[in-house]
Amino acid sequence: MEERLKQQLDFILEIDKEKNILRQTHLSGHGRRENDAEHAWHMAIMAYLLKDYANEPVDIAKVMIMCLIHDIVEIDAGDTYAYDTEGLKTQKAREDAAKERIFSLLPEDQKKELTALFDEFENYRTPESKFAHSLDNLQPLLLNNSNGGGDWREHQVTSEQVYGRQQKTQLGSETLYKVTDQILKENIEKGNIKES
């Protein structure tokens, strides 16, 4: 087998481990905890279906790839819960080390390409990265809402915390932020999110 193909297959097998990284969010219908691969797949489908709601024109293939790779680093770094203030302090360092190790399994050109896309997503500057982040915020919100806000209640999330995170949704999609805001207001009213 040629070296390039071997490297690609090694990477493909390595990222299968993403299926073992459990998130705090539960699947719709009060299911088990979602894994990172399911989250990424769901976001990629959402990107394609909801592309008309991006604030600016986007390269949808690029957005979908960002969605698919944005949590691969959690194979090494682990999932950092959105409202874990201690975990967030070390998240970037853990994810940078993981990015280098995991993407280095690829041939150099593909390593550079995927690393650049990962960094673009993290930097939150392009229309594609802003829209992808909107989906990264909306996807778990939809699942949590479908489960009666159970994850927010379990973690005693406050309105200040959730709005602090969700405000950025509007940078990628004003329309999706309106949906987000409506869902959050309903869950605050129901007591699923503590008012702060």
Image (spheres, rainbow, N blue to C red):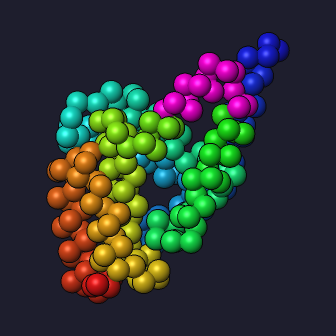
State whether residue 152 appears in this view.
yes
Residue 113 in the magenta stretch? The answer is: yes
- Image coordinates for residue 75, horizontal then vertical, percent: 67, 51
Which secondary structure dominates the residues rendered in magenta?
helix
Based on the picture, tell me whether residue 133 belongs to the magenta stretch.
no
- At 28% from the left and 54% from the top, the residue drawn is 169
Image quadrant for the C terminus? Answer: bottom left
* 173 relative position to 119: left or right: left
Picture quadrant of residue 132: top left
Residue 108: x and y in percent read 67, 21
Residue 171's spot in the image, x, y percent?
A: 25, 48
Q: Is residue 110 above or below residue 97?
A: above
Asked if 82 appears above or below 16 in the picture, the reply is: below
> Is residue 162 shown above or below 195?
above
Q: Residue at x 49, y 32 (%)?
A: 117
Judged left or right of residue 103, residue 179 is left
Q: Position of residue 53 (x, y in %)?
A: 20, 42
**Picture quadrant of residue 9:** top right
In front of the other: 144 or 91: 91
The magenta-colored residue range is 104-117
